[in-house]
Image (cartoon, grey):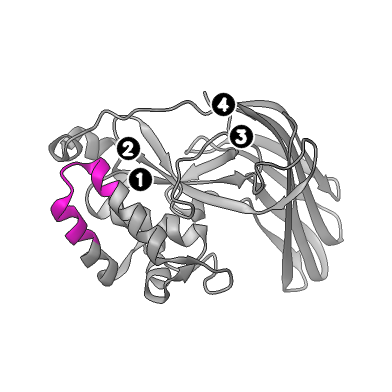
Amino acid sequence: MSATLRLVHTTGYTYNGPATASYNEARLAPLATADQTILHHRLEVSPSAWSQAWTDYWGTQVTSFEVHEEHDELQVVAISTVTVDRKTVAGDELTWDELAAPAVRDEFDELLEIGDRVDPGSDFLQVVRELRGTATTPAALVDAVVGRVHGSVSYVQGRTTVRSPARDAWATGEGTCQDMAHLVIGALRSQGIPARYVSGYVLPDRDAPLGESITSASHAWIQWWDGAWLGVDPASGRVPDDFYIEMARGRDYTDVVPLRGIFTGSPGSKMNAAVEISRLA
């Protein structure tokens, strides 16, 4: 089974006063992978901008663009059509000793670091150590950690921000998909399991009529290393399927921000974002 999905992501800034120039990076193009075929992608920027496309360190397509005229707002519209045919990937069922090998730790050093964004905090780390005590394999620990986060952290918007550390969501028992992904990543890295952050989108209503636009939002899940990269979504507790569109990967949210930039002019701005997904086939 596969799904062909159309994605329209509209975002941008309204400035408190006219901006005289702005410099931005957009990560709004779906990844081209063995599971995803990009049928169409177009990025529209208003006002007109000079732009350049490139691929970042983590393999994400980036468009850098500059606006050199006075403007009160910046609007970016990314329109994509992608066919997703996600294959079932089996890991190598690595042992703890195999994951601890110097070659593995050297190759994935950056995906084993526990920065502030993914720091699970001392309370959750204690839970993870207890789970590790009964996990005979890394895969067993991943299942246990994802299950604990999915069962203990409720999806609630507004309790955290995009800058909140993972430990805040565990302390309150509330957070977003981003917080749950960060929590699991920090937990797995603390036990020597390479893990990376994935951003993208999910079609909310899988039974929606063909062509009907469904309001959605950016989503986040994780991938962990078991001789191959395996995906799992802590927010839903499921393995990503054909209704997930993968956009960017990195160490944490900082590496995958859909739109970021700076501007000159009156201080202050407000960001806006809207996502529509429709199933075409």
Q: Residue at x 58, y 45 (%)?
A: 200
Q: Mark 3 = which residue?
A: 54
Q: Nearer the viewer, residue 112 or 136?
A: 136
- Mark 3 or mark 2: name the one nearer the start of the chain: 3
Question: Of the residues tagged 4 and 1, which is closer to the observer?
Answer: 4
Characterize the local packing of mark 1: few (<14), some (14-19) or many (20 or more) Cα atoms within 10 angstroms: many
Q: Quadrant of the C terminus?
A: top right
User: Looking at the picture, which amino acid does disc 4 mark?
Assistant: Asp
- Mark 4 or mark 3: name the one nearer the start of the chain: 3
Rendered image quadrant of residue 38: top right
Q: Residue at x 51, y 34 (%)?
A: 59
Q: Which mark is residue 85?
A: 4
Q: Relative to 83, is 56 on the left or the right? A: left
Q: On screen, 151 above or below 199? A: below
Work out whether residue 160 can be spotted: yes
User: Looking at the picture, which amino acid does disc 1 mark?
Assistant: Ala
The chief SS type of the magenta part is helix
Q: Mark 2 = which residue?
A: 225
Q: Which mark is residue 48?
A: none
Residue 9 rendering spot, x and y as whole percentages = 73, 48
Q: Which mark is residue 195?
A: 1
Magenta stretch bounds: 128-142
